[in-house]
Image: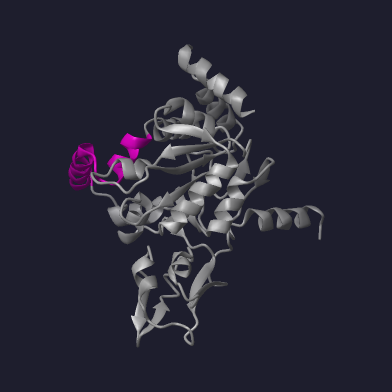
C-alpha cells in the first residue's frame, strides 16, 4: 500500500495541475460535516507552507513583526470588544494538542486498522477538533519539525514530527519531499523512544482546518516548540495526559534530577524532597524516566481529562456499540 501511495505522489509531482494528495484532502473535507471551502484553503496553506506558517506564528519570521504592527494599527483604528487576550483564549479551541505518555504515543503509531472515534470531549477537552479518524493508519511520515527548523539554533535532530494516516501523510510527503519521508510503524516507535530519552514530550495534535481531527504526533522540546511557547504566554493549547507525577517521599533523596528534567518546569524541591505542582503537571512522564532510584511514578488524576490511550478508547466504543 505504501509503495502504491508513493507512486501516486511521484505522478502528481511530475505533472498535473492538482496533486493527488490535494484532491484527496479536498474530497475528504467535502465528507466532513461543517468543513467549509475556507477551512480547506486554510488547511492547505497550513500544510503546504508549514515552515513559513509556523515561523510567523512563533514570531521568528520577519513578517511576524510586520503583521503584529499592522494588527496593532488596525486595533487602534477600529477598536473592538474582542481584544488580543480574548483571541488568545480562543485559539486553543481550534488548534490544540493532548500530552501523551510514550506508551500512548506508541499505540497511536501501531494501529493496524481504520478507526472512527468522534466527539471525545472527555479526552480532548476543547470545543472543536475532538475526533480520531484514522484512515490508512499504517501510512506514517516523519517530517522535519517546522518549529525547530524556524529557530536560529534548533534542537537536533530535526526529523521528529510524525504525520499519521490519510489524507495527511500523503499530502505532506508530496508537498515536502525534501523534508519528509515514509517510515514503517517500527521506526516511528524508535523515534518516540529516542525523543523520550532526550527528555522531550509527545503531543497528539488536533486542528479544525485539518478536518477537525487528529493528524499527527510532535515530539517537542521546551525551547523550540511553538505550542509550549504559547502555554508559557498564557494560551492553554495543551491538555494534560490524564496522569500526574507523584513522589515516594520514603525513597526520594532530593537530588534534583527531576527538577532539571521537567519540560514544563512544574517540579521543585521542598525540604530536600521533590514535589510536583499537581495542578500544573501535564503528566508526560519525563521526570519519572529521569529519576534513577524510581522515586517517581505517574498516577491517574481524575481531575484531568481521560488519557488518549487508543486501545482503551476502542474498547469503550465497542462496549457502547454493543449496548453494554
Q: Name the foreground residue: 169 vs 214.
A: 169
The quarter of the picture where the N terminus appears is top right
Q: Please report the bounds of the magenta region as a residue range.
A: 50-78
Q: Please indicate whether residue 112 sits to the left or right of residue 321 in the image.
A: left
Q: Please indicate whether residue 18 sits to the left or right of residue 266 in the image.
A: right
Q: Please indicate whether residue 246 sits to the left or right of residue 302 in the image.
A: left
Q: Name the foreground residue: 54 vs 294.
A: 294
Q: Please indicate whether residue 68 sits to the left or right of residue 244 in the image.
A: left
Q: Position of residue 31 (x, y in %)?
A: 61, 32
Q: Position of residue 244 (x, y in %)?
A: 50, 71
Looking at the picture, the colour scheme in use is one colour
Query: For the view shown, which residue lies furthest in the front direction?
Result: 292
Q: Position of residue 23 (x, y in %)?
A: 54, 23
Q: Name the foreground residue: 189 vs 132.
A: 189
Residue 93 in view: no
Magenta stretch: includes residue 74: yes
Q: Position of residue 278 (x, y in %)?
A: 45, 75
Please name the predominant secondary structure of the magenta segment in the image. helix
Identify the residue at horizontal 35%, vertical 84% (top origin).
Answer: 270
Identify the residue at horizontal 77%, vertical 57% (top origin).
Answer: 319
Identify the residue at horizontal 34%, vertical 52% (top origin).
Answer: 87
Amino acid at each position: 500500500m505504501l509503495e502504491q501511495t508513493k507512486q501516486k505522489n511521484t505522478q502528481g509531482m511530475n505533472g498535473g495541475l492538482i496533486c493527488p494528495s490535494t484532491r484527496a484532502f479536498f474530497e475528504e473535507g467535502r465528507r466532513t460535516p461543517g468543513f467549509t471551502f475556507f477551512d480547506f484553503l486554510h488547511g492547505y496553506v497550513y500544510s503546504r507552507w508549514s515552515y513559513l506558517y509556523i515561523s510567523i506564528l512563533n514570531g521568528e519570521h520577519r513578517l511576524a513583526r510586520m503583521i503584529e504592527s499592522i494588527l496593532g494599527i488596525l486595533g487602534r483604528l477600529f477598536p473592538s470588544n474582542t481584544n488580543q487576550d480574548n483571541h488568545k483564549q480562543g485559539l486553543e479551541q481550534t488548534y490544540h494538542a493532548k500530552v501523551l505518555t510514550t506508551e500512548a504515543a506508541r499505540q497511536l503509531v501501531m494501529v493496524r486498522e481504520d478507526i472512527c472515534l468522534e466527539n471525545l470531549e472527555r479526552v480532548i477537552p476543547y470545543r472543536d477538533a475532538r475526533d480520531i479518524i484514522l484512515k490508512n493508519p499504517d501510512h506514517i511520515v516523519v517530517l522535519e519539525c517546522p518549529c525547530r527548523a524556524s529557530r536560529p539554533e534548533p534542537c537536533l535532530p530535526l526529523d521528529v514530527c510524525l504525520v499519521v494516516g490519510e489524507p495527511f501523510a500523503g499530502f505532506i510527503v508530496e508537498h515536502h519531499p525534501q523534508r519528509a519521508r515514509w517510515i514503517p510503524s517500527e521506526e516511528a516507535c524508535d523515534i518516540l523512544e529516542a525523543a523520550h530519552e532526550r527528555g522531550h514530550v509527545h503531543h497528539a495534535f488536533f486542528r479544525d482546518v485539518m478536518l477537525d481531527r487528529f493528524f499527527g504526533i510532535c515530539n517537542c522540546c521546551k525551547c523550540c516548540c511553538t505550542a509550549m511557547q504559547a502555554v508559557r504566554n498564557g494560551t492553554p493549547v495543551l491538555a494534560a495526559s490524564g496522569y500526574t507525577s507523584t513522589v515516594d517521599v520514603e525513597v526520594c533523596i532530593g537530588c534534583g534530577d527531576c527538577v532539571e528534567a521537567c519540560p514544563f518546569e512544574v517540579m521543585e524541591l521542598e525540604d530536600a524532597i521533590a514535589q510536583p505542582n499537581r495542578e500544573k503537571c501535564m503528566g508526560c512522564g519525563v521526570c519519572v524516566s529521569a529519576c534513577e532510584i524510581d522515586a517517581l511514578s505517574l498516577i491517574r488524576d481524575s481531575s484531568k481529562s481521560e488519557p488518549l490511550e487508543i486501545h482503551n478508547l476502542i474498547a469503550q466504543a465497542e462496549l457502547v456499540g454493543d449496548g453494554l
